[in-house]
Amino acid sequence: KKKKELVEARNQAEQIVYLAEKTLKDAGDKVTQDIKDAVNKKIEALKSVKDGNDIEAIKSASAELSAELQKIGQTMYGQQGEQQNQQQNPQEPQEPQSDKQQNENPQQDEKQQDEKQGDEKQGDENQKS
């Protein structure tokens, strides 16, 4: 049983090391050198214990490396989110297109208004109960 647990811990450690190295490579310049250095330290720490017999040391080093990887993910997704916000909200105001759409398809507008009124009626009924 202990042997199986040790093998599983080692396998997980190898997967995390591979994932960490791949993530660093993919991240490139998107993350700071400080984060890269921290992740590389955790990779080396995990590599040094993963072939040993101390299951807890392997699990602990794996968890620490995993936590560092989450920081990279947060940094990358945070930057992506900022870029998307800038793209969605350009500095120059655009003319609203909603007026044009309403004139082109009046039947659809009526249906939407009917649905809204229907929703409001249902809401009123729910409040009475």
Image (tube, rainbow, N blue to C red):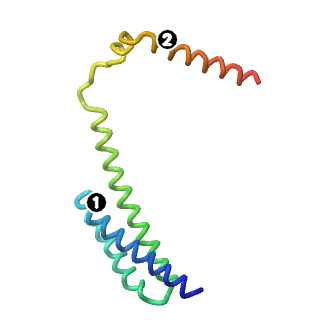
User: Which quadrant of the figure has residue 25?
Assistant: bottom left
Label 2 sits on a secondary structure element that is helix
In the image, residue 52 above or below residue 11:
below
Q: Which residue is mark 1?
A: 31
Residue 123, image x and y in percent? 65, 22
In the image, residue 108 above or below residue 61:
above
In the image, residue 110 above or below residue 69:
above
- Describe residue 96's horizontal placement relative to residue 12 as left or right: left
Q: Amino acid type of disc 2?
A: Glu
Q: Which residue is mark 2?
A: 110
- Describe residue 50's horizontal placement relative to residue 23 as left or right: right
- Label 2 Cα crowd, 10 Å radius (few <14 / some 14-19 / many 20+): few
Q: Earlier in the sequence, mark 1 or mark 2?
A: 1
Residue 36, image x and y in percent? 29, 67
In the image, residue 32 above or below residue 117:
below
- Describe residue 28's horizontal placement relative to residue 78 as left or right: left
Identified at 71% across, 20% down, the residue is 125
Residue 124, image x and y in percent? 68, 19
Q: Amino acid type of disc 1?
A: Val
Q: In which quadrant of the rendered image does the C terminus lie? A: top right
Number of on-image labels = 2
Extreme bottom residue here?
A: 53
Label 1 sits on a secondary structure element that is loop
- Label 1 Cα crowd, 10 Å radius (few <14 / some 14-19 / many 20+): some
Dots 1, 2 in contact, CB < 8 A: no
Identified at 66% across, 21% down, the residue is 122
**Of the pair 104 and 54, the residue shown nearer to us:** 104
Q: CA distance from mark 1 to mark 2?
A: 50 Å
